[in-house]
Image: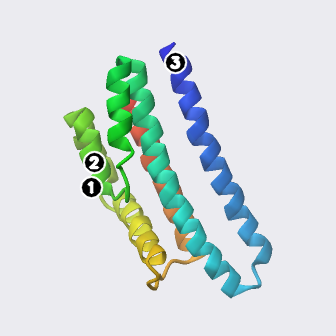
Amino acid sequence: MFLLMYRMKQLEVWRRKQQLEHLFELVTSFQDDDELISHWARYMCVLVSGFLEAAVFEIYTEFARAKSQDFVVNYVQKQLTRFQNPKMEKILSLAGSFNGLWRDKLKEATDGELKDAVDSIVNNRNNIAHGRNSDITYGRIKEYFKKAVKVIDMLEDLCYQ
């Protein structure tokens, strides 16, 4: 049962990832329009930030569901609904709430480029959402997305090792 739930969860995160990858591919179809690509980069940044939030929610909710009774799962879900702006420090703190060793391993593995990418996604998303300037480009958000996926993969690996 545990493995089945894990695979179902993995499929949902994978489905969201595939949708974003498809949208990234669509952007290349209007490569001659720099202004349109610039707008898409901002849009993609918002979606990637949402992907991070949703993936973290799904991973930890399914972990709780696989390991705990329903009332614990309900508590975890309620707490995770407040999880927004998933900067790396917040992700580390959340991982540490489940297991201090997970936090330490994740911090070590993400320090540097992965942390910077996740934090930049959220910072740019907040600038965009609040009408401020963002220097995000299509190439940069595509790279940040790849790094964010690595972080999500690490979260899954820690929960299901």
Tell me if 52 is positioned left or right of 123 in this view. Answer: right
CA separation in Å, label 3 and label 1: 29 Å
Q: CA distance from mark 1 to mark 2?
A: 5 Å
**CB contact under 8 Å: marks 1 and 2:** yes
* Farthest-out residue, left: 100
Vertical placement of 10 versus 138: above or below? above
For residue 82, above or below residue 120: above
| Residue found 62% across the figure and 81% down from its top | 38
Residue 131 at x, y percent in the picture:
47, 82
Give the crowd class for mark 1: few <14, some 14-19, many >=20 residues within 10 Å: some
Q: Can you tell which quarter of the image residue 42 is in?
A: bottom right
- Front-most of 106 and 12? 12
Q: Please state the horizontal and vertical placement of residue 54, each as a whole percent of the image.
A: 49, 47
Say whether residue 59 is left or right of residue 19.
left
Q: Which residue is mark 2?
A: 92
Whether tag 2 and tag 3 are in contact, CB under 8 A, the answer is no
Find numbered disc 1 in the image and state the secondary structure of the residue it sits on: helix
Which is nearer the eye, 159 or 98?
98
Q: Earlier in the sequence, mark 3 or mark 1?
A: 3
Q: Can you name the residue that lies furthest to the right here?
A: 29
Q: Secondary structure at mark 2?
A: helix
Q: Amino acid at mark 2?
A: Leu
Q: Name the quadrant containing residue 113.
A: bottom left
Identify the disc placed on residue 89.
Answer: 1
Q: Give the CA separation, mark 2 to mark 3.
A: 25 Å
Q: Which residue is mark 3?
A: 3
Inspect the image, locate mark 1, and give the three-letter code of the amino acid beneath it: Glu
